[in-house]
Image (spheres, rainbow, N blue to C red):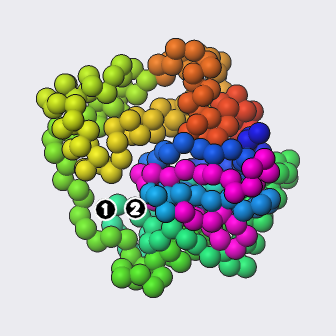
Amino acid sequence: MSFPVAVCHGVFGRVCLFSVDRPMVPHAHREGHLIFHVEGPPGELVVEGQVWPVSPGQAVAVSPWQTHLYRPRVAGLPVTTLVLYIRPAWFLEHARSATASLSFGRVGIEVTDALQRLVFLTTHFMLNPDHDDCDMDERLSILTQAAFDQSWQWTASDGCLSPSGPTRRDYRIRKALHLLQEGAGEIGELDDVARAVGLSRPHFYKLFRDQVGVTPKLYLNTLLMERAIDLLADGANPVADIGFDLGFSSQASFSRFFIGNGVVAPSAYRRSVQSPL
């Protein structure tokens, strides 16, 4: 059974300690994230069709909107991972050079002794929330910066993000993005969005995938997950009400969606959210 051991929300983003023994469905995030092995047998992450180990000494860096999924290598044996969800704004502030978009240089990250020490300290304090940890934000910033810099070593860009300017998207895709962002949880069918922007369903799906990098369905699922996580962390409304507000017909369908995209049940995630960093 998969469950969140501990979760912290803060200005940095989110950091989650997960115990995982089940595969995930393909999904994507607007956030970049880093996955570190903490305990248990190795697992693996499939990032845009390529398999990367999540094992001692080897972490995985996933750029925003890269489609990925997790799957265990040893059935029935959980692996504990530390997962950092990094807001794009943080990267733009801390990148070595000014750029228009966020991307890691490569997926595979070598976990050096210095990185392992930072992972250990973060895990320790997350497992002992009663101990004051005033350095969490700074530690996570150092950990992310070091992994980010390493990902760009020995690449053609040599430590810089892609220098290309902002992508100029078709005005119909810009309108579709606005409709999805403003109406996540209220959108009945993606076909309605296609009609609203004046495109046929096949043309809309192709143009959206070409210009955004993921399918409209994956994009909408990402928006729904982000809203669900924020609402669960806030702790004000019952889980069932959150699911209904996001457009799910029942708490069971909301739970299936959340588990598929986030490994764990929404109620378990809520119980594990700690005080802000």
Q: Quadrant of the N terminus?
A: top right
Position of residue 264 measured from the top left corner of the image (x, y, whole percent)? 67, 37
On whether residue 261 falls in the magenta region, the answer is no
Please tell me which residue is depicted at 55% across the width and 71% down the height of the picture: 108
Say which quarter of the image contains residue 216: top left
Task: Read off the residue under disc 2.
Answer: 102
Please tell me which residue is depicted at 39% across the width and 40% down the height of the picture: 219
Is 243 displayed left or right of 64 in the figure?
right
Comparing 276 with 28, the one in front is 28
Comparing 94 with 246, the one in front is 246
Up-down relation of residue 274 to residue 165 (above or below): above
Up-down relation of residue 101 to residue 189 (above or below): below
Q: Residues within 10 Å of mark 2 (few under 14, many from 20)?
A: many
Label 1 sits on a secondary structure element that is loop
Comparing 108 with 43, the one in front is 43
Residue type highlighted by circle 1 = Ala
- What label sits on residue 100 in the rendered view? 1
Q: Which residues are magenta?
A: 51-80
